[in-house]
Image (tube, grey):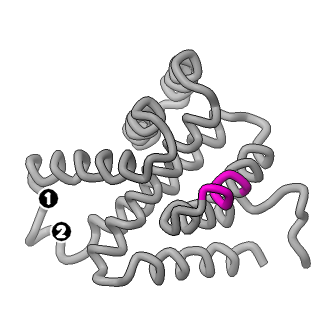
Amino acid sequence: MTADRTHPDPLNCMYGAVAAVERDDREGVDVLLRDLYESFEDFTALLTTMSLVTLERLDAALALGDPASHPLSAEDSLALAAQLLEDAAAYDITGPIGVHTAAQRLDIVRRFDAARMALEVRAARSMASDAELLYGAVALLAATVAAWADRTGRARERAISDLCLASCATTR
């Protein structure tokens, strides 16, 4: 079975965009995020999906080692959150509103609060364009993937490539 090019696989687009962000390939990011945007009828569903994928990578990064013997302290958790925000902003593909609203959505999704998510997206759209919000979400995902790669001791490019290949394998 071949992929329907009019509806690209969202996970492939997300990880492809992360790879493009890491390579500083703005044109690649633009194309992949445009495809991703067009593959969803509901923008809130798109941002929710991006948050779920980001949380999955964050959970994978935090699960390294034995959490029972080395739990993440509140200070370490705050430091990691601050580092992710700083790293996402450093990609310089959107303004601070895009990155910070992406971070807010992680907590909302983690709590499974669909009504609050809809309100947050509506509020965010009053402050930023859909593009800014989507670029903020991919910047935060890229920072999270980079943190996961760093914690596994793997080169970022290799780790991202592995995620891209794994997402392709699941769509066949």
Label 2 secondary element:
loop
Q: Nearer the viewer, residue 7 or 160?
A: 160
Instruction: Identify the residue position indicated by label 2 in the image.
Output: 67
Whether residue 115 appears in this view of the structure is no
Q: Nearer the viewer, residue 73 or 28?
A: 28
Instruction: Look at label 2 and name its amino acid.
Output: Pro
Q: Nearer the viewer, residue 144 or 55?
A: 144
Q: Earlier in the sequence, mark 1 or mark 2?
A: 2
Quick check: 133 left or right of 85?
right
Question: What secondary structure prevails in the magenta region?
Answer: helix
- Residue 152 is drawn in which quadrant? bottom left
Q: Position of residue 159 (x, y in %)?
A: 45, 79
Instruction: Identify the residue position indicated by label 1 in the image.
Output: 72
Does residue 156 lie above or below 52 as drawn?
below
Q: Which residues are magenta?
A: 26-31
Q: Residue at x 30, y 74 (%)?
A: 150
Q: Position of residue 64 (x, y in %)?
A: 26, 74
